[in-house]
Amino acid sequence: MSEKRTSAEMGLPASMRLYSETTVALVIFVLLAALPVLVSGYSIYILPQYLLYGMLAMSLGILWGFTGILSFGQAAFFALGAYAMGLAAKWGVTGNPAYVGLLASLVVGAGLAAVVGYFLFSVGVRDVYFVLVTLALSIMVEQITVSQSQITGGYNGMFVPRFSLSFGVGPELDLSSDAAIYYVVLPVVAAVYFLLRWLLKCPIGKVLVGIRENEDRVISLGFNTSLFKTAAFALSGAIACLAGALYGAHANFVSPSLAGVLFSTQVVVWVAIGGRESLLGALFGAVGVSALSNYLTAVIPEYWQLVLGILFVVVIIGFKGGIAGAIGRVFGGEAGDGGRD
Amino acid sequence: MTELLRTEGLTKRFRGLVANDNVDFTLDSGAVRCVIGPNGAGKTTFISMISGHLMPTAGRLWFKGREITALSVARRAKMGIARKFQTPSVFDRLTVDDNLELAALGKPVSAGERRANIEEVLEITRLHDLRRIVASALSHGQRQWLEVGMLLANRAELLLLDEPTAGMTAEETSATGELIRMLADSRNLSIIIIEHDISFIRGLKAPVTVLHLGRVLVNGSFEEVAENEHVRNVYLGHE
């Protein structure tokens, strides 16, 4: 806290602190946009997956880091999105199945989260009890995708085609090349990032941060917090589901384990390491940890999970704000400042 | 003066314990009332039933002529009932400005009006120079004032102040007395105050309600109450 006070006393204007994380994000997104020009091959294939993990991590970041609601069910939404995409293609829906799948993923994600959230929050389910329900949600989705094998393919999983973008007129844009889908995923992830940043500066974002800080106070100021929490969960569910839809198309495949508790836990780890009170931290926590896991699997296949486990423990004990929080402290409280722009 | 708040037969039982017993109470708009009584008299329980944090076992409440007995905390706050808690309940990690901003968002007003109101509250609560400081860095007294400021930014009409001077220096306490008088006189706010500090209550020159064992023992001016034999016995522990 004292660091924050110092930066405030030095008269650092709020607008400067506001721009710094946005500036960093812009620079990173521009660099990422230029990347396919410089490199090709595996990196360009795998990066969109990591970025979609990052989008999933942001869906948890807005919920856990900014509203104070921890969810172990983000993977359930992610997998549902991928299945929505696969089923849209499998059932040969009219129009461009990709658009139907993407739209369906938003509706399913927001709808499921809104229904679950409303019933839980309006009866006052909080904290660890909410965590347990979301954990159950992950297990349920995983079990359902296993048991409904005539629809989902069960354990064998399901093929999800890479889609094409149609614009009504002119030729379709085929996304089967890695660079093409890279340039679809990157702007979507960037757009979600900036949308969430903007939202946090709006009144609703301030109320969400207030709920994280002191929910009873927010209630006593006249806010129906269960509605705000439901809205946050619905938004989070929609983003996770959309990320999953794109992921399914990118990977060409979805299987029940994508909904599982193990993957849900991984999302929590990414966000904790990256920094839950910074969207950029969550996004690149996911990208960084995924890339690191991928590298370690190749180098030290026996120990990589141990290395990640130790990293997780160190961050939890030593850097409560994750990497973004630590960077923020060094630079006087810009990143990971809890949306207090 | 019009009646703002009325309670009839307000009763709260916690299992065997009767915290409030058949409390009838009225408050006019623009009025200040001190609620005093020894520890365990049921003062905080009484305020909690007005704010909606506790539901009465029996009895009813009206605010601005509308029955509010069954309404939630948030609904009552929307109607204009705002509470300052015994330990200041603010947003510790947010700046003074953001604390007030969030409080102001509780009522639907335009952004310009909201800003103007916050500026005014910053002046009134003497927090203007501290507006960019996080609330946790404020002194205890300043936090108390910040919480009162939040109720003002929230455009409350009835302020429930639970021990507003706890932890304050003598100087801060007297300034708080002036603040409360000003809010009632020039902003026409109604205020119910729970306090232990007798000299503070005397200074307010406001009517006093004495609670004892959950019941209203006596209503009256500070002087009347101070002269009352029952009250003296209660405070001296003879009863």
Image (tube, coloured by chain):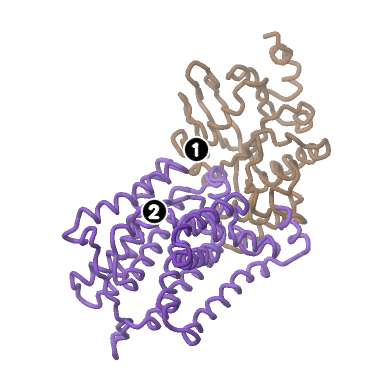
Chain colours: A purple, B brown
Q: Position of residue A17 (x, y in %)?
A: 66, 67
On the picture, is B222 further left or further right than B107?
right
Q: Nearer the viewer, residue A256 or B142?
A: A256
Judging by the rendered image, the residue that carries numbered circle 1 is B65
**Residue B133 position by quadrant:** bottom right
Which chain does tag 1 point to? Answer: B
User: Which residue in the protein does label 2 denote?
Assistant: A262
At x 28%, y 74%, the residue is A98
Total numbered circles: 2
Where disc 1 sits, the SS reads loop
Q: Is residue A240 above or below residue A161?
A: above
Q: Amino acid at mark 1?
A: Gly
- Looking at the picture, how far across and down is residue A269, in whole percent? 49, 56
Query: Who's the residue at 62% across and 59% down the image?
Result: A325
Q: Which mark is residue A18?
A: none
Q: Residue furthest right?
A: B171
Q: Splitting the image into 4 quarters, where does residue A217 fall?
A: top right
Closer to the camera, A322 or B127? A322
Front one among A215 and B39: A215
Task: State which mark lies toward you, 1 or 2.
Answer: 2
How far from the left and from the top, in percent, is residue B56? 48, 27
Residue at 26% x, 51% y: name it: A143
